[in-house]
Amino acid sequence: MDAKKFWLHEFISEKRTFVIPVYQRNYDWKVENCEQLFGDIVHIIENKKPHFIGTFVYQETVGADIFRELIIIDGQQRITSIILIAKVLYDLEDDDDLREDIRSTFIKHSRGELKGKCKLRPTEYDNATFDKLMSDAAFDEKNFAAQEKSSAMYGNYCFFRKKISDSNFKPKDFFNAICKLNVVSILLEDENPQEIFESLNSTGLDLSPADLIRNSLLMPLDYARQEELYKTYWLKIEDLLRPSDNVENFIKQYLIAKRKSNAVMETQKQQLNKRNLYDAFKKYFAANFSDDAAETCLADMLRYAKFFRRLIFNDDTEFDKLSALDKKFYELVYLLDAANAPIVLMYLTDRYDRKHFDEATFIKFVDALISLVVRAKVCKHNGITQQFAGNVLARLDKAATLTEKIFWQAVTFGRGEYSFPNDADFQRELVGNKLSDRLKGNACKYLLYSLERAGDFAAYSEAVIEYILPQRLNDWWKNYLRMKNDSAAHEIWLHNLGNMTLVDKSDKSSGDSFDKKKNRYAQSKFSCTRAVSIFSDWTSKQIQIRAKKLAAEAVKIWTLPEEFNTPSLPADEIVTLDSDFAALKNSKPATLTISGTEIKIQHWNHIVREVVRQLYALDPYNFRRAVQMENVRKKFSVEPTDFKIDDDFYMKTGFDTGTCLKTIDMLAGNFDRLCGTNFKEEIYFTLKPDTPQIEQPNLFA
């Protein structure tokens, strides 16, 4: 390692080209970083004193000759920003001699075989925008596409241009100031650049999980191989999934789809998130690929990224131009905002791509997921969570060929809030609740529109919801409800399904009297709205009649096959860890459910053993810590007793019902606090039919 102090303009010499390696993050300095640099340069102008800008760590390419390429390990954000400032000065300066000084010092080579080439070669991701900005021609924003204008490279050029133009100093003052910046350059010789890079990152450079994952795959390779795999795979993934936030979300959902689990490790219940995504990926790679199989992994990721790209929609998506299958994706992922649905859809697309089923079957699978999401939203169930998606894929993966029945079995396995709501529950919740409390955002509009034109969303943007009984009662409505002896209707039924209808954007006038509304509704292009005009009155009675009719139609659109349409378990037959344990003294358990998986159980002591087994299997270290807490310590021993957990680790059982339940409650609570999990909320039991019923909180309310 060789460290030297330079003036920055000497470091950016005529015979050096700075190369940003593929394992570096893209240029992404924020406004606050640019503000700081600009302030430092203004300080130099005002005080006429040099300023130290930091260290630049680099490596020379193998066989470097007189025209050297320096691979920047640390400092790319700063050097890129300085060159952007220099280009602003070049564009704003009128004096040709000074312009050439600025150009040859910081921007482009002026002699030899590199004449006219930029002194910086950014990542491929930023290269096109950078080349346009560095053009000798005058800057013109019309030359840049919308995607280029959204980049940090373009945004920061414009930021510096405005700051310099608005300042009281001339471009020459800024040029002289950046020539007073000094740096320490550190040349790596025998050191491992990957180790140096990761060490620098650990001390404060803000790399995203996607950056770290890319680097873990590419940095062990020689530079030529890094560039090859970067351009062949990683850059294509980034281009497919712009903006960059999509890449991170894709990798998380890709991991769940491939591993059939949302846990960081098979032995830990901690869920995947931004903080642990990199560690989870490294574990996945180590378990499934050899050390030299980066290309195999990247090829698979690119394949899945193409699947994921089909699931990215926005307000500009032209519904009519989508394929029949993509229309279903649009409905599920975009209109219903099913954020975790891509986990299941990528897996299904993979199997569809391998000819495991045809497109018509695929559409039926997506329809089943749409039904699940709609019913779950209305009934306040969990729907497609990351955990649910992993469990579904684990079940589907056991089948060589996927049929409708196998798929329905997989998506209806859950219990309680993980269950697929049946017809009776779905209709009851549609009719009896404030729909806007259940369906957030545009979900109410989606439901009403689908009741009108299921599957055809070409004119979706033209429709809006109107409350028949208006949200704000004017004098006419107040007098009307008083006359009908139904003044409570507004408070009770305002947000009910029966009181909402669709109208054109241009046709909305919710304060009209009911007679005026009837006349408008009779001319509506929406049949469900025209049907309102047949009512002579509009009170609680009519709202409930219409709600029941619409709910009956809803179960025909968002279907559940009869063989899976089983009655939900009554709330008073479910026992949770919030129950009154004393009331269960003479009871017998029938099933134990943990995280949506149901297990048949004969005795309360068997439940204790099963919970202990599962918690210990998930995280042995933290489970041993959990049992050392005062509230449960005496129940465990290193001496052999009736229940062996592991070598030299035993548990005393044979407890009464109350002690069993208290032990599970305390163990799950201890474990959750240590691991950041929510096991306690995901454990519940059912009782055998001859068990006396007890008072329970209504889990399905």
Image (tube, rainbow, N blue to C red):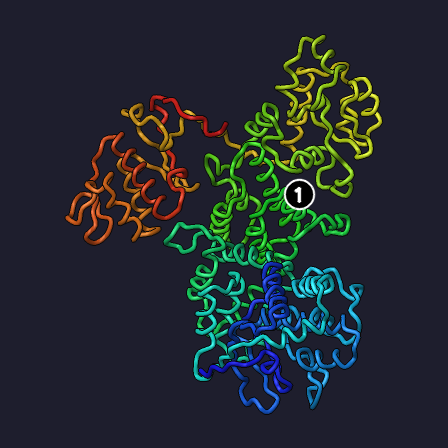
In the image, residue 645 sits, relative to residue 557, either above or below, namely: below
What is the x, y in percent for residue 479?
Answer: 73, 11
In the image, 682 versus 193, the foreground residue is 193
Counting labels gives 1
In the image, 289 versus 143, the foreground residue is 143
Horizontal side, residue 307 vs residue 453: left or right: left
What is the x, y in percent for residue 486?
Answer: 66, 11
What is the x, y in percent for residue 218?
Answer: 52, 72
Q: Is residue 44 something one can see in this rendering? A: yes
Report the residue at 68% width, 86% height from top: 114
In the image, 11 versus 546, the foreground residue is 11
Quadrant position of residue 92: bottom right
Report the residue at 41% width, 39% height from top: 682
Quadrant position of residue 138: bottom right
Quadrant position of residue 579: top left
Amino acid type, label 1: Leu
Quarter holding the N terminus is bottom left
Which residue in the protein does label 1 denote? 335
In the image, residue 481 sits, relative to residue 411, either above or below, namely: above
Report the residue at 51% width, 61% height from top: 209
